[in-house]
Image: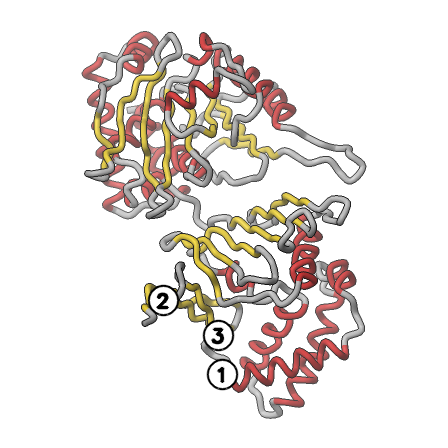
């Protein structure tokens, strides 16, 4: 017997879409099912007839659509033809219903079809097509991977969607260049592969950009981190201690980096460097975001992470954020920047703190262990693939000799972040450079924890609103 797990509505233009997540009796994963509430089944049948008639009348190829869809030249002509057909089959239709039907046919023919509905669902993180032989898949924030009731009829259709997206992103994908990585103007990240590289069919993977970026208050509310853990990261960032956010693939490293960026003071210059723009910092900050650039079809014009790191050091930054540290040259420049007084924050692939240090100090990155102590804090985030829950696994300080010392560790039985060791190096640094006693540091942590709990209590979750609170906090610290 089928069991409904969840249901809600999504608005796409004038259409109201009903989403049902159902565990069907004979299926191993739940199904994400969509239906357009204000279009009856009879109307949908007539719409299919209109679409088929429209396609037969439109003497335009897929490549023509891809070339001109951005300018709207073809779209206007299509709307006129569609209106004629709708008037033929629905002579007494009202204006609102007419707009709904026009947008439906346009979406089906020169848009991304039902994929556009998935793109509008804020509960989805990923939208995936594996081939025309199986339905589209989605990754739901609450329910994980789900099969949908959306089928893409042919490989040609998938290729058409990929071409549309490539043109929007200013990229090219061909049989000679069958792989594509791109970002759309709305921040969504896209990967596509063509037959025969992906042997079962053309693939399309869209990682959706979160409309409202995660804030530190969101993370505390969802138990991704505790107020105590967040207070330690805040203390470190206020006092310009460099930090890495480590974790596995899709564990939430960049989201955590974005969340702790709420703690930057507004009177310092921040340069961020990313392959694809994902960070959204508070608008109270002096922030310059920069992105890498792929080479053009002639192999020219590439701007690498290393290019941007070297350039950032010439821009008088107080803080440098690096989306991900991957290569030796990038790491060497960043660690040199730390040793010359710049505070650096970045993400790194490693599942716990000891693994992070091992990966940093061995090929291909090969940072000398003597330099690792330039990082003061490593925070490790983890996603449980079975439950989908994201948690801060560890918060560790790095000792003077480059080893790790875990301060807080997640207890999975209690589902909470618990103390393992009290800080040592953090106390030493703050005493040496700020004259703070251990008691003053502990009191400061308690004060920060109180502020965070008040933000949670008052449901202040917007990064820009939190930025305003932080700006007032720092002003009061400086001016009393």
Residue 51 in which image quadrant:
bottom right
- Residue at 58% from the left image edge and 39% from the top image edge: 276
Circle number at residue 194: none
Q: Is residue 178 above or below residue 54?
A: above
Which residue lies under the disc numbered 1?
A: 40
> Nearer the N terminus, badge 2 or badge 3?
2
Residue drawn where x is 65% and y is 60% of the image: 158
* Residue 373 vs residue 471, the one in the foreground: 373
Asked if labels 3 and 2 touch by Cβ distance under 8 angstroms, the answer is no
Q: Which residue is mark 3?
A: 36
Secondary element under disc 1, as helix, strand or loop, is loop
Quarter occupied by the N terminus: bottom left
Q: Front-most of 84 and 422? A: 422
What is the quadrant of the C terminus in the image?
top left
Q: Earlier in the sequence, mark 2 or mark 1?
A: 2
Can residue 283 be seen in this snapshot?
no
Q: Looking at the image, what colour scheme do you see?
A: secondary structure
Q: Return the x and y of residue 355 as percentages of the image width and height.
A: 41, 23
Residue 47 shown left or right of residue 14 in the figure: right
Nearest the camera: 49 or 225? Answer: 49
Relative to residue 239, is residue 221 drawn left or right? left
Instruction: Decide: few, some or many residues near mark 2? Use Cα within 10 Å; few <14, some 14-19, many ≥20.
Output: few
Name the residue at 75% across, 64% down: 62
Vertical arrangement, residue 423 with respect to residue 96, above or below:
above
Tell which of 280 and 159 is nearer to you.
Answer: 159
- The residue where tag 2 is placed is 7
- List x then y, in percent, for residue 105: 63, 74
Query: Cα distance, mark 1 to mark 3?
Result: 8 Å
């Amino acid at each position: 017997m089928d069991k409904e797990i969840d249901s809600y509505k999504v608005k796409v233009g004038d259409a109201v879409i009903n989403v049902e997540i159902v565990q069907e009796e004979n299926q191993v994963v739940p199904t994400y099912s969509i239906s357009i509430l204000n279009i009856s089944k009879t109307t949908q049948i007539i719409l299919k007839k209109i679409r088929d008639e429209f396609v037969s009348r439109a003497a335009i190829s897929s490549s023509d659509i891809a070339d001109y869809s951005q300018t709207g030249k073809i779209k206007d002509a299509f709307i006129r033809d569609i209106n004629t057909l709708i008037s033929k089959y629905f002579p007494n239709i009202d204006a609102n219903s007419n707009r709904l039907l026009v947008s439906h046919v346009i979406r089906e023919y020169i848009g991304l079809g039902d994929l556009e509905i998935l793109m509008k669902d804020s509960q989805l993180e990923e939208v995936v097509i594996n081939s025309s032989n199986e339905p589209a898949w989605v990754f739901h924030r609450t329910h994980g991977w789900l099969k949908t009731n959306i089928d893409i009829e042919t490989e040609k259709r998938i290729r058409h969607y990929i071409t549309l997206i490539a043109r929007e992103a200013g990229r090219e994908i061909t049989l000679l260049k069958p792989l594509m990585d791109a970002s759309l103007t709305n921040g969504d990240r896209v990967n596509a592969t063509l037959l025969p590289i992906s042997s079962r069919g053309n693939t399309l993977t869209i990682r959706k950009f979160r409309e409202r970026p995660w804030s530190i208050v969101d993370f505390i509310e969802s138990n991704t981190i505790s107020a105590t853990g967040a207070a330690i990261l805040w203390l470190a960032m206020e006092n310009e201690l460099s930090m890495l956010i480590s974790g596995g693939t899709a564990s939430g490293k960049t989201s955590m980096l974005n969340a702790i960026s709420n703690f930057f003071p507004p009177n310092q210059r921040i340069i961020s460097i990313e392959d694809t723009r994902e960070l959204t910092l508070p608008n109270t900050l002096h922030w310059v975001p920069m992105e890498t650039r792929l080479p053009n079809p002639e192999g020219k014009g590439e701007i690498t992470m290393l290019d941007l790191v070297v350039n950032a050091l010439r821009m008088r930054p107080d803080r440098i954020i690096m989306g991900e540290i991957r290569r030796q040259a990038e790491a060497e420049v960043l660690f040199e920047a730390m040793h010359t007084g710049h505070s650096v924050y970045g993400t790194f692939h490693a599942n716990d703190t000891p693994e992070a240090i091992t990966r940093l100090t061995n090929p291909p990155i090969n940072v000398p262990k003597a330099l690792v102590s330039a990082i003061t804090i490593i925070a490790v985030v983890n996603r449980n693939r079975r439950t989908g829950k994201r948690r801060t696994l560890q918060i560790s300080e790095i000792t003077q000799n480059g080893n790790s010392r875990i301060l807080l560790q997640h207890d999975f039985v209690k589902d909470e972040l618990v103390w393992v060791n009290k800080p040592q190096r953090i106390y030493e640094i703050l005493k040496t450079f700020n004259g703070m006693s251990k008691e003053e540091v502990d009191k400061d942590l308690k004060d920060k924890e109180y502020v965070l709990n008040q933000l949670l209590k008052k449901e202040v979750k917007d990064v820009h609103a939190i930025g305003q609170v932080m700006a007032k906090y720092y002003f009061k610290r400086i001016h009393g």
